[in-house]
Image (cartoon, grey):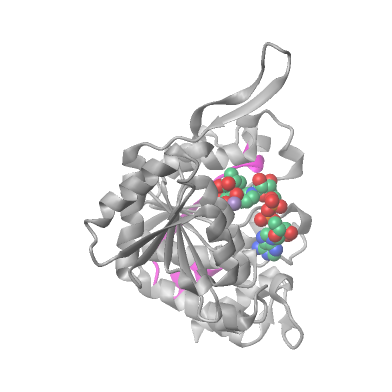
């Protein structure tokens, strides 16, 4: 069966890093191991420039009809003053919500070759393998009401609503428990239940689901402590599950433990395992167009796509092994470069992964 994959290059470094992931997918197709058709569409600032909307109807249709979607990144300073509904980030939130991609998996895995690139001491991070499960279509990102208004004293106020329905907590909880079952069976739920009612409910629901998974050891941690524990003793974590905003912040933090934000892939899944795959980082406007961005998070996101949406776990394993080989061969983009290694550009890194795949 041919898989129908939609490619959304996006903005900034998006087209450069997505180009490398597409090269890897095409290499697998050329050797006959992957039956797929690629289509391309616009999301974010590039879509706004071309069609006046960050998530135009043409993209919506292709997205809905695809088996899986691979995205670069969206956003850029030239769009920051647009009306909020027109901004690139709203396009990204729009596609996540439209396809109900509530389950966001962000694996922070340290390749042993990068132990010295981590911002923490090698002994603290060696062997690190954390799966962060982030709720992606609810919470303060989407809660109503929201806005900026002026009160009766003439002072402006901005507000957002943090709200979670039990059903939303339950479904992300099940994703996290299911993943924990396939790993070390330890799940840490991160919340702020000492202050927030939404977190109180979150904790209660997690406890309830835990009864269905007696083998999984569930613990709870307040988010401020979790941020501290992540840099003090990160290997204590196996699977973490948390809300949309806490997961956004903690996953960027965890990425640095693995050497660079340029190493952290992600999968965003819905109930029918249709998925959007993207690096966890943004469009990095500061380095766009220079062939220096690290394409590995995007290439590893393509591997996650093969594993989670296309049922091609062996191909995913091969891509991950190829990334490891390239790192073992000493190739590094600027963000993970250290003395004694060889600095390469975005395209050269992609080529090296393909060469390692072929062996
Ligand atoms: P960012 O992740 O784009 O960049 C943060 C820092 O990390 C920058 O110094 C950047 O150069 C570096 N970096 C990021 N990816 C890299 C890579 N692959 N290789 C090497 N270095 C890399 O975050 P930001 O600067 O806060 O945001 C820039 C824009 O991206 C904003 O418009 C933001 O809204 C958007 N954004 C989009 C996504 C997404 O599309 N999923 C995610 C985060 C931010
Ligand atoms: C991410 C990004 C997005 C988020 C933004 C760009 C909407 O930071 O994918 O982590 O906050 O979810
Ligand atoms: Mn983020």
Part of the protein shown in magenta: 23-47
* Above or below: residue 52 compared with residue 13: above
In this view, 16 is above or below 147: below
Do we see residue 102 in this rendering?
Answer: yes
Q: Compared with residue 67, is residue 201 higher up or lower down, i.e. above or below?
A: above
In this rendering, the answer to whether 121 lies above or below 152 is below
**Quadrant location of residue 18?**
bottom right
- Give the position of the N terminus as an image quadrant: bottom left
Q: In the rendered structure, does residue 265 fall within the stretch colored magenta?
A: no
Residue 198 picture location, percent across and down? 43, 39
Residue situated in front as seen by the camera: 160 or 314? 160
Q: Which quadrant would residue 113 be assigned to in this image? A: bottom right
Q: Closer to the camera, 197 or 254?
A: 197
Residue at horizontal 71 percent and vertical 70 percent from the top: 335
The structure residue drawn at horizontal position 49% and vertical position 41%, both measured from the top left corner, is 95
Residue drawn at point x = 31 percent, y = 53 percent: 174
Measured as percent of width and height from the top left, residue 255 is found at 59, 65
Residue 20 seen anywhere in this rendered image of the structure: no
Q: Residue at x 74, y 72 (%)?
A: 334
Nearest the camera: 257 or 26? Answer: 257
Can you give x and y, in whole percent of width and height, for residue 236 in the image? 47, 72
Q: Quadrant of ligand 1?
A: bottom right
Q: Is residue 105 left or right of residue 208?
A: right
């Amino acid at each position: 069966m041919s898989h129908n994959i939609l490619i959304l290059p996006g903005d900034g470094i998006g087209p450069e890093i997505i180009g490398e992931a597409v090269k890897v997918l095409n290499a697998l197709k050329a050797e006959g191991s992957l039956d797929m058709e690629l289509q391309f569409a616009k999301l974010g600032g590039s879509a706004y420039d071309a069609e006046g909307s960050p998530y135009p109807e043409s993209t919506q249709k292709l997205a809905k009809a695809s088996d899986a979607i691979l995205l670069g990144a969206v956003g850029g300073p030239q769009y920051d003053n647009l009306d909020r509904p027109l901004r690139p980030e709203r396009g990204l939130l729009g596609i996540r919500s439209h396809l109900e991609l509530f389950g966001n998996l962000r694996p922070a895995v340290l390749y042993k070759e990068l132990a010295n690139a981590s911002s923490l001491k090698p002994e603290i991070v060696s062997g690190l393998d954390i799966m962060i499960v982030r709720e992606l279509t609810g919470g303060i990102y989407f809660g109503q009401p929201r806005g900026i208004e002026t009160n009766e004293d003439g002072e402006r106020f901005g507000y957002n609503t943090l709200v979670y329905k039990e059903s939303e907590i339950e479904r992300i909880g099940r994703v996290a428990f299911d993943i924990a079952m396939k790993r070390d069976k330890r799940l840490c739920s991160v919340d702020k239940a000492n202050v927030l009612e939404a977190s109180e409910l979150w904790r209660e629901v997690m406890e309830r689901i835990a009864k269905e998974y007696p083998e999984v050891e569930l613990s709870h941690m307040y988010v401020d402590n979790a941020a501290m524990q992540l840099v003090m003793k990160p290997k204590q974590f196996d699977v973490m599950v948390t809300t949309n905003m806490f997961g956004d912040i903690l996953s960027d933090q965890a990425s640095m433990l693995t050497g660079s934000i340029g190493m952290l892939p992600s999968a965003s899944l819905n109930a029918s395992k249709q998925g959007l795959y993207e690096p966890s980082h943004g469009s990095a406007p500061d380095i766009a167009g220079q062939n220096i961005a690290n394409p590995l998070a995007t290439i590893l996101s393509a591997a996650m796509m093969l594993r989670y949406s296309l049922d091609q776990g062996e191909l995913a394993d091969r891509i991950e092994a190829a990334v490891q080989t390239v790192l073992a061969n000493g190739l590094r983009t600027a963000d993970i470069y250290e003395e004694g290694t060889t600095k390469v550009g975005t395209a050269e890194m992609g080529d090296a992964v393909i060469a390692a795949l072929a062996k």
